[in-house]
Image (cartoon, rainbow, N blue to C red):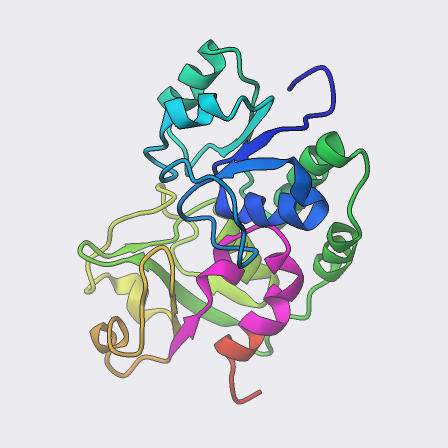
Amino acid sequence: MPSHRPERVVCLVPSLTEAIAATDRRVLVGVTDWCTHPPGLDLPRVGGTKWPDLDAIRALNPDLVVANAEENRAEDLDALRASGIAVWVTAPATVAQAVASMRALLYAIAGSEPAWLTRTREVWRAPVPLVPRRRAVIAIWRRPWMVLGRDTFAGDLLRGLGVDNVFADHPERYPRIELGDKRISSADLVVLPDEPYRFTADDGPEAFPGEDVALVSGRHLTWYGPSLLEAPTVLRAQLAPES
């Protein structure tokens, strides 16, 4: 972290780009190709999250690069540090950790906690869970099929909303599975988000015939930023549309 409050920030994490923009858009000088929120963000693009253009980042002369331990490669972040650029890396595995991580970052950037984050903390202090609770498979990819396993932010978010992950005790965080896995039959819900894999009504549900399938917003399930404020309302409606 620079010794002074950063004035030129490149963000390599789409959800944190939205968070920083909602707090002080003026400090952002570069973002990734995948930074879609807020809409209309007119800033230099520095490539993808996994393969950013390091020379383009250096050319923007940032005093801070914001990254995530899962979304960004350690070797890229090490190369930026070797160039004398400060790098802030987040790695939350729970909603509470995400809120705390954002508070620390945004306080460092803006000098105070933004009002939207204060409201977010209140919303997630005691979210209203589904009744009855559901037991779910939460897919994140197909070809091969991958699901949420242990210690994931999205899994913790769903747990708070009354949806328990049947793979939560798996030794891997994002295990590959076979559709015949017996844990699938122990679930009463299959959750299919529209990112990172874009599951749709025509791509995904057919693999789980006879199962209750919920197509949900990947941004509200996997992003930690202003979307967390909306997530309980949006996801409850998608998980239990009849309620």
Q: Nearer the viewer, residue 125 or 101?
A: 101
How many marks the image carries: the answer is 0
Q: Which residue is at the front of the view, 172 or 85?
A: 85
User: Which quadrant is home to the N terminus?
Assistant: top right
Magenta: predominant secondary structure element? helix
For this view, does 177 lie left or right of residue 137? left
Q: Is residue 188 visible?
A: no
Tell me: 202 left or right of 69.
left
Check the image and name the residue furthest to the bottom. 242
Image coordinates for residue 189, horizontal then vertical, percent: 40, 74
Compared with 163, 29 (above or below) is above
Q: Residue at x 49, y 54 (%)?
A: 222
Is 39 on the left-hand or right-hand side of 34? right
In the picture, the quarter occupied by the C terminus is bottom right
Q: Residue at x 52, y 81 (%)?
A: 240
Q: Nearer the viewer, residue 136 or 45?
A: 45
Is 233 within the magenta? yes
What is the magenta range?
A: 213-235
